[in-house]
Structures are given as C-alpha cells and as structure tokens.
Amino acid sequence: MNIIKTHPVKELGYNFIESKYIPDGENEYHIRNIQNDGKQYRSLTMAELDTLVLNRNTSDNWNNILVAEQFNAALIKNCKFYGLVRIGFLEPGYKEFHDFRMPVGIYNSTIISCDLGDNICIDNVAYLSHCIIASNVMIANVNELATTDYSKFGNGIIKEGENESARTWVEVCNENGGRSILPFNGMLPGDAFMWSKYRDDEKLMSQFKKFTQKELDSKRGYYGKIGERTVIKNCGILKDVWIGSDAYLKGANKIKNVTINSDAQRKTQVGEGCELVNGIVGFGCRIFYGVKAVRFILASHSQLKYGARLINSYLGNNSTISCCEVLNSLIFPNHEQHHNNSFLCAALVMGQSNMAAGATIGSNHNSRGADGEIQAGRGFWPGLCVSLKHNSKFASFTIIAKGDFPAELNITIPFSLVSNDVANDQLVIMPAYWYMYNMYALERNAWKYKDRDKRTEKIQFIEYNYLAPDTINEIFTALSFLENLTPEKNDTATAIGLENTNRITTIIKVPQSIKIFKELIQYYGVCVLISHISKNNFKNFEEVKDSIRVVVSRSEWLNVGGQLMKSSTLKKLKDDINTGKLESWDKVHIRYKEIGKEYDADLLEHAFCSLLEILNITGKQFTVELFKKLLIETISTKQWMTEGILKSREKDYTNPYRKMVYENNLEMNLVLGSLEDNSFIQSQFEALENYKKLVAEINNKYCSK
C-alpha cells in the first residue's frame, strides 16, 4: 500500500529541514541565504499584488513573496506560489537560444520555496521546489525540478542523521564491489585508480573516505542550483541536481542526484531520452540520445551517445562511448568505444584505447562469483569480435586480432599483435607489430590524443608519447623474455606463461622484434637527451652530462590515471596522505601538479639510465664520440619510422581489394582524400627534416672538435 500523508496546505513550502537539524539561532533558510549570496529583496507593493492576482496567480501567503527593486508583476501569469519565494528583476522582452524563444517572466508553473534570478524565463514547470535559479535561465516544459533536504548532488557523502547505507558507491573494476570508490565532484582518474587499487592499505582507504566526506557539507538543507544562462526544455524529472552555467538540457527523461559541471568556456549538454542517476558529469561533456548512466563519474570533455549504458564506472577525460554497454570499469583518459554490440565489463583500461565492434571484454567468468577482472595498459586495442576471459592482463599497446580467446591471457610484451590461431590450436603473438605494420595508426593516435585534449585545467599531466618510461620498462621486460627463447624455423619460438592452457604459444618474428625493441630504447634515450639540450643553453658536452641525474638503476614507473610517475613518487604520495601531510583531495591534486612539473627531470633520468643499460655502459663511458654516433643512428630510426607511417597508409590505396569498390583513382581520392594530400603524413616528413636539422645543430655545437 502506498503511504500518502495529509498535511495542512499552509505547511506546503515550509519545514524543509527538520528542526533538529537547524542550528540554534538559525531558521530553515540559513543555508539557502548563504547560497543566494546575500541578495536584497523587498515586499510586494499593493499595485504589484493586485497585478499578480489579476493575472491568476495564487500564494499561500503573499507576504512571503519577495522581489527585487526592478520587479515587473505583469510578467508573472497563472502560477501557484508556496513558501518563501524570492524573485529578481524582470524586464519585458524575450530570450532566444538556438531558435528556442521564450518571453521573460514566470508562467503556468507551481513554485515552492525557490529563489529565481533576474530576467529568467520559466513556463509550464509543473513542480519547481527548493531550487536556486540564477539569472537569464530558460526553463520550459519540465514535469519536476525539485530538491530534497538531504541532497548530495551525486557525491558519495552522507548527511546529518543518515546511516552508512545511504552512501552511493561506484563499483569499478570488479563486479563484487571489492574495489568500490566514493564519487565526488572533481574526482580525477588518479584518485579513482589509487582508491580502487591499493585495497590492502587500510589507512589510505580511510583517508580517502574522510577526504570525500569533507568535499560537501554534511548539513541538511542545501537547495539545488541552476547556473546562469542554462537552458532546460522538455524534460521529465530533475531531482537533486546541481547544474553549472551555460548548460543545455533538452528532452532528458530523468536526472537524479547528479552534479552537471558547465561554464561559458566548457558547456555541457544533455539530450533526448537520457537518464542519469547518482553521478558526476564533468565540464564540457556531451550526453545524447537515450543514454543510461547510473552510479558513474564522467570526467571533463567526454561523450556518451546513442543509447550508451555506463553503469558503476568512471570514464576518463576526452573519451567517447557510443551505443555500447560499459559496466564496473575504470577507464583512463582518451578512450574510444563505439558500436552497439561492444561490451566492456569489470576492467581497468589505462587510456589511449579503442574498442571495435563486437568486442566482448570481460563477459566470461571463470569462478562461481562475479569477481574476475581485466587490466589493460594504455593503447589497448581489441579488434572486431574479440572475446576475452577474466582474469586477463595486457601490456601497453596490445592489439588483439578477431577471435574468441578460450583462456585467460597474460600478455607481457608491449606493442604486440595477439591472435588465436584456431586451425592450429595455438596462441600467436607478434611483438613490435605496430612498428612493422601499423606505424601510421601508432603515430597518428599519439598526435590525435594530444591535439584533442580539451582540458582547460590540466591537473594531471598525461603522457601521449608511445615511447615513455612505462612502455620502455615493458620493452626491457619483453627483451629479457624474448632473448631467452630459442627461435626455430621462420624466426618463430614457442613459449609458456602467456595463456592459461596447455596448448602451444607461438612467438613470431623474434629476431626482428628484438632488434626493433633495442633500437627503440636507444632512440628514446637519445630523443629525450635532444629535447633536454634544446631547452637549455649548455656550453659544451660535459655541461650536458653534468646536468643529468645519474642513478644506479632504471626506476619503476606506474600509470596513475593517465599520469606517469615513478613508483617511489607514488609511494611518497601515499605516505603523505596516510600521515596527514596531505589532508584533502585538493592537496592531493596540488601534488599531482607538482609531480607533473618534475616529469621532465624524471623522464631525463630514466631515459639516460635506459640508454646506458641498453648500451651496457657506465655514465663515464658515455663519451662525446659515442653521442655523435648515436645522433646519426637516431636519424636512421626516425627515417624508417616515418617511412613506415607512409607505407602503412599507402596500403589502403594500393591493395586491389581496397580499390575494387572505386571505378578509378579519381573516385577513390575524392572519397578517401589523396595520399599525397594527407596533412598528417606531410607533417611527419616535415618533422623528419626538422629532426635532421636539429641533430646537425647539436652535432656541430657539442660534438665537433
């Protein structure tokens, strides 16, 4: 039986906060008044009251209708007011936004205890309760826009008098909830990673919970807010929402317990048929066409489109999920996932990733509980109709060929192509695949992600280069593995430990991949040195060497929400959180910035150490003669990489099966764009020439006698 209570109508709009939660000497409006920035209002004049009544407006108590000095009562018609309602000044005219036009004023609406800003347009809002609406806002045809006294606006906190069960947790990475995190407005990928990862650190978990509880006042009585110039039309239910300025909501079915960040430079939009419950939407996001998101964090400048489902998940900055379903996942920045038949579940995906149609990542559980996980380094690229089993783990820039993989995988070799050879019943791995056959995609993606980073406040520094401390360390690990293999015919070898089966795992092109990996480490080391020299005005080679921190061994690095940092740096960060030196999320975010400023120095240290290691020399043996030789060799490396970019794209124009759908080359070029006019390829060859000039300059200045 539904319990429907009856109260005197004179109480409608009052007692928003229970008396026991109101501090001594305050009233139920004490928080509302703070939220409204102390704006001044006056009572209605008799003439204004007569006009309001004549225009078929009603109020339980006209004395509780307060207005700004320049108030125009003629612009309010056919409305019902309950409780304390405060209205800004209204001027005759109409507002227009994207061909949507509304007269200034308040019409055909029920308004309960709200503050309404200057020159607003409100029409046909059936139930508007306990909200603060800023100036120049347009709202039309909304069934319910209301706020409860215990609203958290998507943050994982509890209010006064609430039990722990009232917290909203987001169950990322694992369906059994063992890696759950508490959402908060401004949560960064690094925050989510540390919280979900280091579950064995009880102090750290406790600190994170305390930090989150402090993110929003636990007092009851906060009103929902709609920021300036926000436009809301044709929506169903908007409950317990906090919306920034310049947002655009049109045709959403339901938005409940959600913060939507938006401002004039980073406008957020929510479109038709969308349902958002218990979540945070970052600045500059786009959510369109039937999206369902529940218990979620959507970082800035990301998109959900075309019926996408995002549940118990964190989606990193500058990402797009379209059509498909994503459950219980933590996704770092720069993720692309399209196609209605693409499915991602119980996964940690470390960014710069792309999922193809039919990919089913993490749907197969191998235990009696829903407790499996998949962990994928950055650059993860599962191909068409790939099906993977829990638990699986992939090194950076793993590309997976179409296939149904029958067992768990532990792919420790980066830049590999992984295939399931059904005919021969074997797993096949090609290390360094990208460098042999797909340099265009590898290089273009690095450029694309950097170019499309729309973050205006880059708190976490994100490394887009595919050769960086994390991938170089993985290459070293791969080299140790590959060099212990015994190549057989056709440069192949067999291996164990990469798949949880007894069948053969075949590694192909072993000598070629070893050669490429060694060359890449050398190239990485010299390129970082060149960058360091270019940023400084050193007098000679010895001064260059003196500027480099020399360490005993190559440092370990981790990807913390897209930000690469040394494991020792991360340990210091966690220690400072545990000891109270960092006592809030804001302080943690400041530390992220500080770590980002140290990245170039840490990168230089790692690159130089890697170079010495691959050359098997000491720092003293790194002479000017050797440096000159390495400079010349990097030109050769840069040359074949650049030519590989052209060749991998050229196949799309020369393969007869690609060309057969076109009658002639003119038609193909008009559809695809000509290879010669490809601006990205042109830019790469220009970069090659600039690199040659830079090497020549450094050679002349530091290596010539």
Image (spheres, helix red, strand yellow):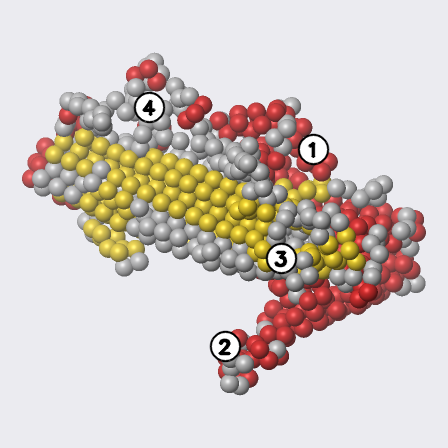
| Nearer the camera: disc 3 or disc 1 | 3
- Label located before the other in sequence (3 or 1): 3
Which secondary structure, mark 1? helix
Front residue of this view, candidates 149 and 31: 149
| Nearer the camera: disc 3 or disc 4 | 3
Amino acid bearing label 1: Lys
Q: Position of residue 375 (x, y in %)?
A: 62, 45
The numbered mark at residue 266 is none
Is residue 13 rendered to the left or right of residue 699? left
- Label located before the other in sequence (3 or 4): 4
Which secondary structure, mark 2? helix
Question: Label 2 vs label 4: CA separation?
Answer: 64 Å
**Image point 20% across, 40% down: which residue?**
126
Residue 657: name its quadrant.
bottom right
Viewer can see residue 15? yes
For label 3, count other residues whose C-alpha is less than 10 Å away and answer few (under 14), some (14-19) or many (20+): many
Amino acid bearing label 2: Val
User: Circle 3 sits on which residue?
Assistant: 400
Front residue of this view, candidates 526 and 562: 562
User: Circle 2 sits on which residue?
Assistant: 671
Which secondary structure, mark 4? helix
User: Circle 1 sits on which residue?
Assistant: 571
User: Circle 4 sits on which residue?
Assistant: 30
Question: Label 1 vs label 2: CA separation?
Answer: 52 Å
| Nearer the camera: disc 3 or disc 2 | 3
Is residue 349 rendered to the left or right of residue 428? left
Question: Label 3 vs label 2: CA separation?
Answer: 29 Å
Position of residue 103 relative to residue 665, above or below, is: above
